[in-house]
Amino acid sequence: MPTVNTVLGPLDTAKLGFTLSHEHIVLSSAGIKEVYPEFIGSRDAIIRDAAKQLTEAKKGGVDSMVDVTTLDLGRDVVLAREVSKRSGVNVIACTGIWRDIPRAFWDAHPDDVAALFVREITEGIEDTGVKAGIIKVATDQGGVTPANEIILRAAARASNTTGAPISAHTWALERVGEQQVRIFKEEKVDLNRVYIGHSNDTTDVEYLTGLLKQGVWLGLDRTPGGTAAGSPMWPQRAETTKRLIDAGWGHRIMLGHDWSVYPGIIGTRKGQQAFLDTNPDGFLFISRVFLPRLRELGVSEGAVKQMMVDNPRRFFEGRG
């Protein structure tokens, strides 16, 4: 049977179940937890809080989540492994690089960076034995920069070598996904292995269907929303989701929150708490609020299951 790497080892894709496609446990910056632990606070407390929240999510029907926390976002797969053990939620870790591209990579050759990603997929991350199940990249406002292009091409080459899928953070309001897809096509990536995330930051269905027609998957994975300036809140995001389903694209959509237990990249503790206060339901907002709204709009139970269960499984299996 096909398997996907999780923090607890290979998992039969048939056991992924209800899957959140884009989440985080801890968001920080590379090295902060290790060098300045007092800036973050008690690591044990974060583990307890994360385990509590994911245990609640498991009881609420969440079986798996993709934790797209990269090196530059303070990735900690040992922490994720412990939280997965305690909660029972399958956690898929990533390799790759987010927006904070290390200076050492700015002039690197894509092949040299790709080799690092390949090692984390095939051998493991650091000395933990945890293998990445997906490659994360990010292109934000302003589009692809020279350093970002190195990372995108490295991710493409690592995907071509290993078959691991790619999850792309994008700035949908500037149609940045189109730039990413252009590079992936140049690198001859199987676009069925590419997930263009944060796509529900826009209501431009023409842009979104244009991406889908090229063969990628869409991540409608900022829910409730409002974290990106100028982007819609969740009721509009629900309407966009319904429009895509009505247009026949329900089989290429996955949902997530882009939520985190510890949102350290926000900065001040007051700002972090304000972020957390926007969504008291945490990892269960989609189940408790968003999916009921889709049902009110006329989305069938079959379409809900397709987005939350069938599509993530097919994505990790490499099936269109």
Image: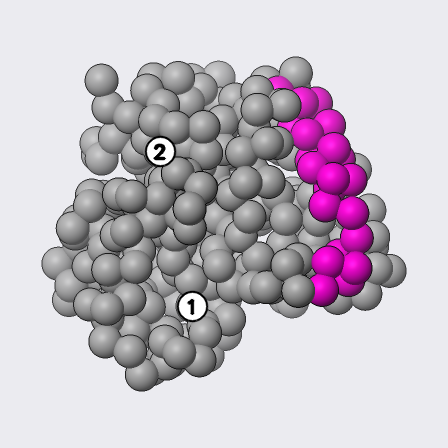
Magenta span: helix, strand or loop, mainly?
Answer: helix
| Amino acid type, callout 2 | Asn
Q: Position of residue 222 (x, y in %)?
A: 57, 48
Residue in front for this viewpoint, 142 or 289: 142
- Residue 231 appears in the rendering: no
The residue most toward the front is: 127
- The reply to whether the magenta stretch includes residue 47 is yes
Residue in front for this viewpoint, 238 or 190: 190
Dot 1, how many residues are within 10 Å of its Cα: few (below 14), some (14-19), or many (20+)? many
| Amino acid type, callout 1 | Thr
Residue, disc 1: 139
Q: Residue at x 39, y 17 (%)?
A: 15
Image-quadrant location for residue 179? bottom left
- The reply to whether the magenta stretch includes residue 230 is no
**Magenta span covers which residues?**
36-58
Nearer the camera: disc 1 or disc 2: 2
For the C terminus, the image quarter is top left
Residue in front for this viewpoint, 289 or 245: 289
Residue, disc 2: 5
Image-quadrant location for residue 28? bottom right
